[in-house]
Image (cartoon, helix red, strand yellow):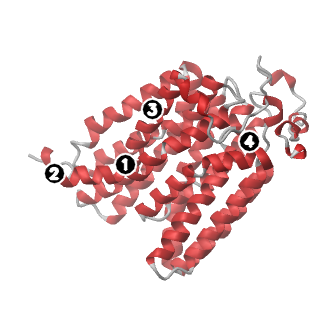
Amino acid sequence: MSSLKLDSLPDEPVEALSHDTSSLSNDGIPDGGFGWIQVVVAFTMNCFTWGQTAAYRLRFHRRLQFSLSMLVAPFVTILTRRLGTKPPMLLGICIQTGGFIFASFATQLWELYLSQGVLLGIGLGITYVPSAPILSQWFSKRRSLAVGISSAGSGVGGILFSFASKALISNISLAWAFRVTALIVGVMNLLSVLLLRDRNGAVKTKYVGFDTKLFFRCDVLLMLGWAFMSMLGYITLLYSLPDYANSLALSTGQAATISALLNLGIAVGRPIIGLMSDQLGRTEVAATATFLCGLICFAIWIPTNTYGVLIIFAVLSGALVGVFWMTIAPIATEIVGLAELPSLLSITWLVIVLPILFSEVIALELRRRAVPYNSAFSG
């Protein structure tokens, strides 16, 4: 165990690569330099983890993936404390890649649940959880910008995989589309992990799977409440918008375009909101963006019945709806500091499991009991 202590991890030689102490912030954080390489690494990983989940339109599988990836967070946090950052991530990549390969041989629905749902979800979680705190270790004043750029990778990946998977399925079959995706995802994530560098030793990071003392802090509870409520709206909008497009009698191609534009909004909007967060305040911008996203749902989404207006809404909502993902690590850092950031994030991932899994079910039930979408506004 002594050979696996976090403060013995080799991070100092990496910082020395830049030989630029002028970029150090007052708290000793590089705030750039080699950190920008880590932004590219995180962007790539978001593209080939969360981005690829947008490729296949089986919504229950995606919710199952999402919820399982968050549910394993305490276990992965403990595993990271014992083994370091990279070994769990390599395990996650193997499981994720294996999930795609097993899915390519599936002949029954339960086999897809097990491969594309369970294995991919667990693989995503084991890959993502150890990497989530790392960018905050490299940046201080530009922390939100760095996280915003990296989280935009999920939007870019969503666009790329949505069109690529459709072409692959049309030309070489669904089974081989899974296998090609497995190869691409596995290779790109492996390269990303090889370039990944944490600063756990420098910031004396603590990895506690479920740190109960954090629940006695009001600021932590407020942040967790915001996370829970944000996911209720995020999942509902993310998965219901394409179905809403179909309800307007739009073509399949137009519905696919709406999904692509939503991902485009994510890719463009997240770095902008990250930059604004650094300049105007992270909590303030997160609260404002959350409010604005809810406001445009009432002002634009509910009354619209035309393709053109829905395009505008897709782009605007894409830029705002995922504000949680680009601000949670910087906000959590301000609340508990870098040392306890992984512990707080571990709890946060657990808190959002239930809204991820059940928010769309609740939304569909509400729609079933009421009127279909916007018919109340049709005249």
Residue at x 35% of width, y 43% of height:
312
Q: Tell me the element at label 1.
A: helix
Q: Tell me the element at label 4.
A: helix
Query: Which of the pair 362/301 is nearer the observer?
Result: 362
Residue 64 x, y percent position in the rendering? 48, 59
- Which residue, as the protein is rendered here, is positioned at the far top? 26
Report, in whole angstroms, how far the alpha carbon at label 3 lies from the one at label 4: 30 Å
Report, in whole angstroms, how far the alpha carbon at label 3 lies from the one at label 1: 15 Å
Residue at x 89% of width, y 43% of height:
2
Amino acid tagged 4: Gln
Q: Which of the labelled discs sits on residue 371, or is there none? A: 2
Query: Which of the pair 360/311 is nearer the observer?
Result: 360
Depth check, mark 2 against mark 1: the one in front is 1
Report, in whole angstroms, how far the alpha carbon at label 4 lies from the one at label 2: 48 Å
Residue at image mark 3: 225
Residue at image mark 1: 359
Q: Which of the labelled discs sits on residue 196, or is there none? A: none
